[in-house]
Amino acid sequence: MKTYIEVEPGVELYVEEHGAGDALVFIPGFTFTTEVFSRQVNYFSKTYRTIVIDPRSHGRSTMTVHGNDYVTHGTDLKKVLQEMNIENPTLIGWSFGCLTVWEYIRQFGTKGIKGQVLIDMPPKSLSLNENRDWVEGKIDDMAAAYTNYLRHPKGQRDFISAYANGVMVQRDLTNDELAWLVEQSLTTPYYIAANLFSSGLFSDYREESESGSKQIPTLYVVAEHWSSTARPYLNKLAPKAEVDVLGGHMMFWEHPGRFNTLLETFLHKQT
């Protein structure tokens, strides 16, 4: 089923629902869409009620100049769950989609949430202790990305292209794969992408990371390239969470078999 959920007057989110059973809700990352999770939908919809969302100003959802921040995205998620009568879901966020999950917990708590899966996103993106903490990147590098790239369409294309080739996967992308990834991002206009980028970078969800992992089953899946920092950081901040390491930033797409097995094993532990 494909549908649209109105989260405020004039703003609709595109949502797909497949299968039946316990609910899994997938939330894509910065400027990406439901399409990135196609290999998870195909697999898990055979045994689970599998829901994927285009967040506000992503994909086929309404493009709006309002609410392009993760506080609003958390509220939007609540409205989707309510409108679709989704009970006891496992929330699965990728990259900045994790911020939506944490923001939901900040606003509404963990009651009625069965578990959470957080794919390759530190709960605080920037830190003055960037050589010790798990962060999204160095402050100067993130500032340069915002200033030099996310200020015009060509810059957004170049930024996503470089990120896709250098961070998302561990192999060479074909021309068609790279074009598809860039097209995913460009459904979000550059001026909205810049807002989302800055909102994400200045977020701090360490408290929700810690408290959420104490209250509901939690799985982090982190990329290999920063696992030596991420794993000890998470073991200290959220010691009750499971932490697995796999591939690059988009490991669920590049290594779907291995990722789906990790996720399925985690889900079975909840039953």
Image: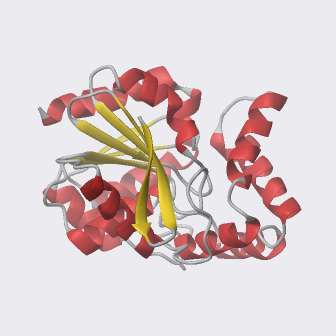
Residue at left offset 75%, top offset 46%: 182
Q: Which of 32 and 243 is in front in this view?
A: 32
Which residue reaches farthest right?
Answer: 154
Q: Where is residue 127 in the image (x, y as percent from the top left)?
A: 52, 76
Q: Is residue 250 above or below residue 153?
A: above
Q: Position of residue 268 (x, y in %)?
A: 19, 28
Quadrant in the picture for the C terminus: top left
Residue at left offset 60%, top offset 71%: 64
Quadrant in the picture for the N terminus: top left
Q: Where is residue 162 in the image (x, y as percent from the top left)?
A: 79, 50
Q: In this view, does 183 lie above or below 172?
A: below
Q: Is residue 144 above or below residue 251?
A: below
Q: In which quarter of the image is residue 206?
A: bottom left
What is the count of numbered marks?
0
**Colour approach in the figure:** secondary structure
Left or right: 135 as drawn, with respect to 100: right
Q: Which of 133 and 14 is in front in this view?
A: 14
Q: Position of residue 72 (x, y in %)?
A: 43, 73
Q: Quadrant of residue 251?
A: top right
Q: Which of 14 and 29 is in front in this view?
A: 14
Residue at left offset 34%, top offset 56%: 80
